[in-house]
Amino acid sequence: MASLEISQLRTLIAVSEAGSLTAAAPRLFLSQSAVSEQIKKLEDCVGQQLLLRGKAGVTPTASGLQLLDHARRITAMADEALLDLRGESLRGRIRLAVTDYFKPGLLARMLKQLAHIHPGVRMEVSVLRSVEVHAAVSSGRSDLGLVMSLDSAQTQLQAMGCSEALVWASAPGWQQAGPLPLLVLPQSCALHQLAIRELEKRAIAYEIAHQASGVAGLQSAIAAGLGVACINASALGEGVVQTPAGLNLPGLPRVWFGLLPAKGEEPELLGQVRALLLQQWSF
């Protein structure tokens, strides 16, 4: 009977996080050909194609996403067993600052998994704008920072395989009259800058109709029918839908989420918590 190899499951996770076999290879301390062989053996084992390969990299298939969920739980349990047998359960306090654009469901799942593996670690989470996350980590008020970036080159953050589409959002049934009423966060927000840049590039008339202080306020303004905003797809929900294509708004890129890199050598607790969080990304 065929059985799953933990090393192959870790390879699947790393490739999905990195977005390509080439980017995953250094993380795994393997050559690209060895990574490819690991994925092939795993696909042969399960009898399913797990990754779609394209010019932009790789994306998990439906079967790949299904196996990724199992892989994260299996590898986490294996790590937990090893730490338990070694008597290395972590204890201490970690301050995590998170951009308010990040998926709340995924954040909750990541923290739940960490609490399950290391109940002695107390996580203090602050939800802030990305610019404030940078400032909190830089000043030492936070130990870890999870931010959003438009940098598809993935050069500045860790675990930037976690990405999603940007969309134009409005209230259901919303209709435009006159210049496009644009809803934004403060000017330091990357999506504020992107929205204006794309509209002006295409000579689309707009006006700033409302500026919110955070994503929750932005969602409320959208749901109230005050106008249109550029947001990440996971921010859609009740009262906030993707704007109909008939408005001919500009196409938008994807955004990437990741942890700010370590500043030099980290304390053991912080380094291990960072590694555990990086294992929990979902795509």
Image (cartoon, rainbow, N blue to C red):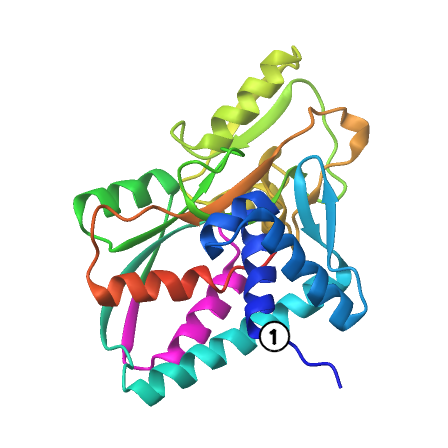
Name the residue at the bottom extreme: 85
Quadrant containing the C terminus is bottom right
Q: How many marks?
A: 1
| Above or below, comparing residue 60 to residue 180 in the picture | below
| Above or below, comparing residue 84 to residue 91 in the picture | below
Q: Quadrant of residue 37?
A: bottom right
Name the residue rendered at 64%, 61% in the picture.
Answer: 38
| Above or below, comparing residue 126 to residue 22 in the picture | below
Q: Quadrant of residue 213?
A: top left
Query: Magenta span covers which residues?
Result: 101-123
Classify residue 123 as left or right of residue 184: left
Name the residue rendered at 69%, 67% in the picture.
Answer: 42
Name the residue rendered at 58%, 47% in the picture.
Answer: 32
Name the residue rendered at 34%, 79% in the picture.
Answer: 118
Residue 87 appears at what percent x and percent y? 27, 87
Residue 202 appears at what percent x and percent y? 66, 13
Residue 112 appears at what percent x and percent y? 45, 74
Question: Which residue position holds label 1?
Answer: 5
Whether residue 16 is in magenta: the answer is: no
Q: Amino acid at mark 1?
A: Glu
Q: Quadrant of residue 268?
A: bottom left
| Above or below, comparing residue 95 to residue 159 in the picture | below
Would residue 88 be visible to someone looking at this image? yes
Classify residue 96 as left or right of residue 21: left
Quadrant containing the N terminus is bottom right
Whether residue 102 is in magenta: the answer is: yes
Q: Report the magenta stretch's main SS.
A: helix
- Crowd band around label 1 with a 10 angstrom C-alpha radius: few (<14), some (14–19), many (20+): some
Q: Nearer the viewer, residue 134 or 217?
A: 134
Would residue 210 be visible to someone looking at this image? no
Q: Nearer the viewer, residue 66 or 123?
A: 66
